Each structure stands twice: as C-alpha cells, then as structure tokens.
Image: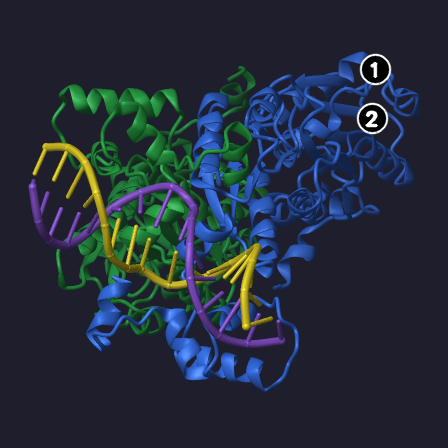
Chain colours: A blue, B green, C purple, D yellow
DNA sequence: TTGTAGGCGTTATCAA
DNA sequence: TTGATAACGCCTACAA
C-alpha cells in the first residue's frame, strides 16, 4: 500500500529515507544516524534532517529496519486473559512504560499451559525483542520457558510457580504480604485471625499467601486450625467458609485475612447476613486492590500488588539482557502496599458515609 | 541475533529460505509459494518443501516478508485500558480470532482522546494491516479516525459515539437492549420500573441505553419521572439513587433496570439495607455480564453485550477492506443476550442456595 | 564526521 | 507451473 501511495505521488524511485536525504541534502546514512539518535550533535545538518523528516511526515519503515538490524521494537506479552484482573493491571502498567522506550506490545493469550507455550513459540518466531509471560494459575511454565530460546531473546516470567532457576522471575513477596496483613490487623486490635488462603489452584495474586504457614511470625495469630482454610479465590468460597467459621457464636475470629478481594467480598456478604458488623466486630482485609473492594460498602482494606514495580523490573531485565551478555537469571519479589479502607478502620459504619454524593 | 545463530551453526551464507529450498531441491520462490499457501497443489514438490521446512524448523522472517509484501500480519487495537471490562472482554474475543487468521495483536492504550489519537497514528506508522479502536467513554474519536489514513488501512471503531459516517462502526444495539430488558422484566411481572441510565459520560456498555427515552415501546413502563435517573455507572450511584427512589414506602418500583452491573450491585446493597427482598419484592437486571453480577448473592440477571459478534464483525470488515477496494463504511449494531439469574427469577431466595458448595 | 555501497530474507515480476 | 532476478527500505561496514 505504501508503495502505491508513493507511486501515485511520483513515478521516480523515491524510497522514503532517500527523499528525506535529498531534501536535507545529505546522504541516507546521515539521515539514518540523525533520526536514530546515533549522532548527537545538534548542528545544522541535524536540524536540516529533522526538518526534512517532519516536512515529509517521514517515519522509518519498521519492517525494513527490523530486517536490517534484527530489532523489531516489539515485546511479546503472554497472559491468561485480559479479563483476569492481575493480567489487566500489569498490562496497563507495561504498555505505557514500553512505549516510552519505543517498544510495542504484541499481546497474546493462552488459557492453558499448552496454549501459552504455543504463544511463546509463535512470538519468538515473530521476532519479538523480548517476552513477558504471566502463567495461568497453577501451571508451571518455567520448564517451557526455559526450553524456549532463552539464550536468544530475554524472557521474564511474572508471578506464578517457577521451579526452574534458569528463568527470570518477577513477582509478589508472599512473606511481606502476610506480614503486612497481620501487622495491619494487629495494629487495629485484631487478635484472633481467620485466614482464607488460596489453594493449590491458586491464582496470581493469591500466590503471595502460599507456602509460609510455618512462618514463626504468624503462627501465633492463627491458633484455631479450622480458621485457616484453603480453596478457590472466589466470592462463593469466602461466603461459605465464613459462614462455617462463624457458626459457633461463642468462639469467633475478630479479624479475617483473605487471599483475594473476591474472598473478602464473599466473607462480607456472609457477615452481613449473620448481622455481624464490619469493622466494629470483625476487621477484614483482602488482596488485589480490585475495583470491587474499593466500591463495596463498607469499602474493603486490601493489599495492592506491586504492579508498577513488577512491570518496571520486567522491562528492565529485558533491556539489560539485550545489551549485556548472559547475566544470571534474576528472581525478584516486591512487597505489596496496604490500601486502608473502612473494613479495618476505627469503628462505626453507617449509611451516612455513603448517602452523601461522591 | 538470528544471524548469530546461523553463523554459529555454519559459516556459509545460509539464508533460511535458501536452506529450505536447497534441502527440498527447488527454488526459493517455490518454497515461498508453497509455504504461503499460494500454491495449492499437494504434489511431491509441496511435500518436499513442507518436510524440509519442518526439518529445519523454518518459519519465515516476518520483517523480510513485511518489507517485501507490505503486509505485516499485525492488527492494531487501541483501547482505553485493559482494566476496563468492556475492552478486556472484547480483546479476549479478538485475539484468538485474529490469531486464527495468522494476525498478531498490537495492543495500545490511551486514557484520553488525544492519547488515543497518538496511538492510532503510531500504529499506522508502524504499518499495521488494520486498526480497531475502542474510544474512551464520552470521547468522539470518529473525527480523528476519519482524519487518519482511512483510505490506506481499514479502521473499525467499536462502540462509542460516532458522528462521522465515514468510519466503520460496530457496537451494541441500544434499542434492542432496552427492549430485551423491559420484555424480560414484564415477563416476570415487573410493572412499575425504575431505570438507572448512564449519563453523558457514559461508558461503552452503557451507551446502549442512551438516546431512546422517547421510544414509545418503553415510555409506558417508566411512568414516574423521578424513577428514571442519569449518572455514573458505579456501585455508589446505584446505591444512592435506589435509596432515594425507595424513600416513599407507599409508592415504590417493583423492578429496576440498570445500565451497568455495577449500578445493579449498588442498588442491591441499598435494597438489602432497606430490607427489601430481591427478587420477591423487586426484580432487578443489570448490564455487562460482569463476574460480579454472576457471583453476587443473589446472582444478578444481566444483559451480555455481543462481544463475540462485535469482534467477528470488526475483523471481517478489516479483512474485507483489505481485499476489495473502497466499500462504503459500515455501521452495525448487535443485540445483547439476556443472562437469566436469581435477581429476576421466580420468588424465594435463601441461604440454602449458596450454602451448598459449587 | 560523512558518504558509498552492499546486504538483511522475502516476495513479485517476468521469462522460460 | 517453476526458476532466476530484482526490488522492498533501511542500516552499517568501510572508505574517504
């Protein structure tokens, strides 16, 4: 199509960069150098080139440039689905940062480990400069990733299981997460805590809470074994588990830590139904910083995953791998951030909070 | 990098397609034709080529192919944000369908009309084969889109305002939406309906409900002017408006239509607080088929936007525009689908529904 | 520092 | 149909 546009304007062999070079009265090489920033003087030549480029609305043909330089300015991102809140949040941080670097995001999704593997292969074949993978919940993609052309292009796994130490990993710091949650709860006078953990089929955000039941820092607060449950990160599960845990009116938790905001919402529904006031009688904290937690009534305190840090680190690793040669795989976990809301605030909730607009 | 890989294997000038051609004992031209499906015989030659390609793990260098053919196999998608449920749902339908066609999705997001315009320009400069744009709520991008190289590459706008008839548009059929909602409500004995419409700052899904207040089919059910409100599509708004509408215990609606699931949830919260039973005393229907509506207790009947149809149509238009020359811009609206749930079902809700797992 | 010229891997053209 | 050959537009040795 481009060629059509050109030929319609003139019949001469007018390669874009050639036109710019002609107008600026320099060689195409100089144009290339100036425009790619490889010539940093700001003299007359540079100005002439830039002016010519602007006048002609020139922008380099990316296919030609990729072909010659083996750099596509393209980053592959493999996610379970954009509907997944974790993936969506991360993507929303990744894309602008990548664009600042002149990189485009090639988005691809796979709902199974196999599909994700195919995405990875396909994107590598497409020639992406780097690959960021968010595995589907429960799957261990690290083997697949390690098998891919890890030596040719940089790959970063975000969150999820990672059994292969050969793969770059960026994620949420689970121990910090739990510590933040517990500290926040105890700061607000929570003493006997119910903990709804993710199960084995845990999702990305829930990951954070797994595998540290034995941390000495926390066991003190989770006395009652039946107050720690494992399961899906759903509203339904939060509802069911909460009803069960609060069956005995004599012996109830006064605080609940949830591995996801959905669980927290389900739990709140159950408490509401039981006529138990939040935060007066029970404090509750979720995880994931979902829109729902913010909008719920009362609003739910939550732990915000370090989306921004993860996105930055992933991009940093990719850039780094491209320049330097063969760094060791890196493995970095960032702590979440407490978003304080009504569900753990000092007492008193009421309609008055919500009645006034905005 | 590729060249490095090659040279490490051998020092001869082994262009990928050349290797395949050599192994299959045909010319590179033939390899190209067979592999690109432009030669549909399945004779010995074709088989030899395919075998050779597979043996060598060959896949065409997309940069070279794009450079020569001016086809990048790349589709630009501009969305407000992947966090936006509408965009996420659509993207999740678009990507697999595009991949079936061998197209990759270049995802780009802009939170303002200006940013989205930049995304469009940038993607066009990048050489995408087509562009799909979901405008941010309230913005009218059709001018910007019309100004873009619409004659060079096909652009489709999905949902949102479209004042320029020169732009391809695909979206939700608002009149059908309202009719579906009302029919469903009246089928379930709703007689006096409260309607929480989107405001001027309406979002994509809400669009559907705007601009047909005067439809004679519906005015009959919306007697009370104060029972039709305009505003944000938020939980908060649904909560507030509902409290207000139900102030007078003598004269209350027995059904509520909401322009979004969030509104419906807020409304349910308010009703719960007022001790009004859903669906026994009030039927309620939302819009958007959000996860929240499905998980809420009781689950909320909702209208599912025609994501699949919209995605398919958008891709069809793009393919069509590429082949044929200069069709007239198309403008297609699809009706939503009712997802029946408890909030409009026959009476009786109770804990029993939820108590049993799954 | 600038210009010249060759090649990146593929597909389109054209002749056989 | 197939094969030889010439672009596609850019970048980068290399020479000046």
Looking at the picture, does residue A247 appear above or below residue A80?
above
Report the Cα–Cα distance between label 2 and label 1: 8 Å
Residue at 71% across, 17% down: A229
**Quadrant housing residue A18:** bottom left
Is residue A86 among the parts visible in the rendering?
A: yes
Q: Does B168 sit left or right of A52 as displayed? A: left
Residue at 39% across, 24% down: B56
Q: Chain of mark 1?
A: A
Q: Quadrant of the C terminus of chain A?
A: bottom right
Residue indicated by mark 2: A193
Question: Neighbour class for label 1 at 10 Å: few (<14), some, many (≥20)?
Answer: some
Looking at the picture, does residue A245 appear above or below residue A34?
above
Q: Position of residue B327 (x, y in %)?
A: 13, 61
Question: Neighbour class for label 2 at 10 Å: few (<14), some, many (≥20)?
Answer: many
Q: Residue furthest bottom?
A: A44
Which disc, if any, is residue A224? 1
Is residue B288 among the parts visible in the rendering?
A: no
> What element does badge 2 sit on?
strand
For marks 2 and 1 on the same chain, the one whose residue lies earlier in the sequence: 2
Residue at 45% across, 83% down: A25
Looking at the picture, does residue A247 appear above or below residue B32?
above
**Quadrant housing residue B351:** top right
Q: Are marks 2 and 1 on the same chain?
A: yes
Q: Position of residue B285 (x, y in %)?
A: 38, 43
Residue at 47% across, 45% down: A106
> What element does badge 1 sit on?
loop
Q: Position of residue A65 (x, y in %)?
A: 45, 56
Q: Chain of mark 2?
A: A
Viewer-nearest residue: B26 or A196: B26
Q: Quadrant of the N terminus of chain A?
A: bottom left
């Amino acid at each position: 199509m481009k060629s059509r546009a050109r030929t319609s304007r003139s019949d001469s062999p007018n390669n874009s960069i050639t036109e710019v070079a002609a107008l600026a009265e320099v060689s195409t090489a100089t144009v290339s150098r100036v425009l790619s920033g490889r010539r940093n003087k700001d003299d007359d030549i540079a100005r002439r080139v830039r002016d010519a480029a602007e006048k002609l609305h020139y922008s380099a043909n990316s296919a030609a440039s990729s072909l010659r330089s083996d750099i596509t300015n393209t980053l592959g991102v493999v996610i379970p689905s954009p509907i997944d809140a974790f993936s969506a949040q991360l993507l929303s941080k990744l894309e602008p940062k990548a664009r600042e670097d002149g990189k485009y995001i090639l988005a691809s999704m796979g709902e199974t480990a196999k599909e994700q593997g195919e995405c990875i292969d396909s994107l590598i074949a497409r020639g992406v400069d780097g690959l960021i993978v968010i595995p589907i919940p429960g799957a261990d993609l690290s083997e697949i990733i390690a098998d891919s052309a890890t030596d040719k292009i940089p790959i970063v796994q975000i969150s999820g299981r990672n059994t292969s130490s050969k793969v770059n990993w960026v994620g949420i710091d689970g121990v910090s997460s739990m510590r933040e949650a517990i500290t926040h709860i105890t700061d607000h006078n929570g003493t006997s805590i119910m903990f709804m953990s993710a199960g084995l089929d845990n999702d990305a955000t829930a990951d954070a809470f797994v595998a540290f039941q034995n941390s000495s820092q926390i066991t003190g607060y989770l006395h009652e074994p039946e107050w720690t449950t494992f399961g899906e990160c759903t509203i339904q599960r939060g509802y069911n588990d909460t009803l069960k845990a609060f069956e005995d009116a004599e012996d109830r938790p006064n605080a609940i830590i949830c591995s996801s905001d959905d669980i927290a919402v389900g739990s709140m529904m159950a408490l509401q139904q039981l006529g138990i006031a939040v935060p007066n009688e029970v404090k509750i904290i979720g995880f994931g910083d979902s829109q729902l937690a913010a909008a719920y009534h009362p609003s739910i305190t939550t732990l915000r995953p370090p989306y921004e840090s993860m996105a930055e680190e992933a991009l940093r690793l990719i850039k780094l791998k491209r320049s330097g040669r063969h760094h060791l795989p890196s493995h970095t976990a960032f702590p979440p951030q407490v978003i304080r809301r009504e569900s753990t605030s000092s007492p008193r909730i009421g309609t008055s909070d919500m009645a006034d607009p905005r």
